[in-house]
Amino acid sequence: MAGDKMFGGMMKQAQELQARMAKMQAEAGEKTVEATAGGGMVTVVVNGRQEVLSVTIDPEVVNPDDVEMLQDLVMAAVNDGIRKTQEAMSEQMKGMTGGMKIPGLFGG
């Protein structure tokens, strides 16, 4: 039956795409991005698994009378780092899927 053969081919393509995606996610997990806030006063490094690997704070920004500003800078840098990793993953997915949006995949 032609329908069974077509379905089998689609399943094979889906499995190949899934394998390529798993490999891409593993490779992306090893890549890092750097994000800063406050003109470089706070710097974070985030990997492709969206894990914060390091936080660097310039001592000049540490002011016991204005802890909220430091907290805001750290939060802004972390959020920027996460956003950058999501954008990088989305770009890789576009290349892999030919721009086709797949629901549930990296904002697809």
Image (tube, rainbow, N blue to C red):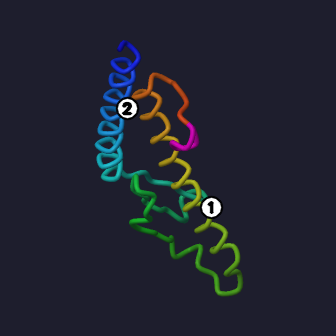
Which residue is the site of mark 2? 14
Q: Is residue 8 left or right of residue 108?
A: left
Task: State the residue in front, 16 or 68.
Answer: 16
Boundaries of the magenta span: 103-108
The image position of residue 2, as x and y in percent, is 37, 12
Q: Earlier in the sequence, mark 1 or mark 2?
A: 2
For image coordinates 33% across by 22% down, the residue present is 9
Q: SS for tag 2?
A: helix
Amino acid type for the residue under numbered disc 1 = Ala
Residue furthest bottom as drawn: 64
* Residue 21, picture quadrant: top left
Amino acid type for the residue under numbered disc 2 = Ala
Q: Residues within 10 Å of mark 2 (few under 14, many from 20)?
A: few
Q: Identify the mark at residue 4; answer none if there is no mark.
A: none
Q: Residues within 10 Å of mark 1 (few under 14, many from 20)?
A: some
Between the residue at mark 1 and the residue at mark 2, the CA separation in whole angstroms equals: 38 Å
Which residue is the site of mark 1? 76
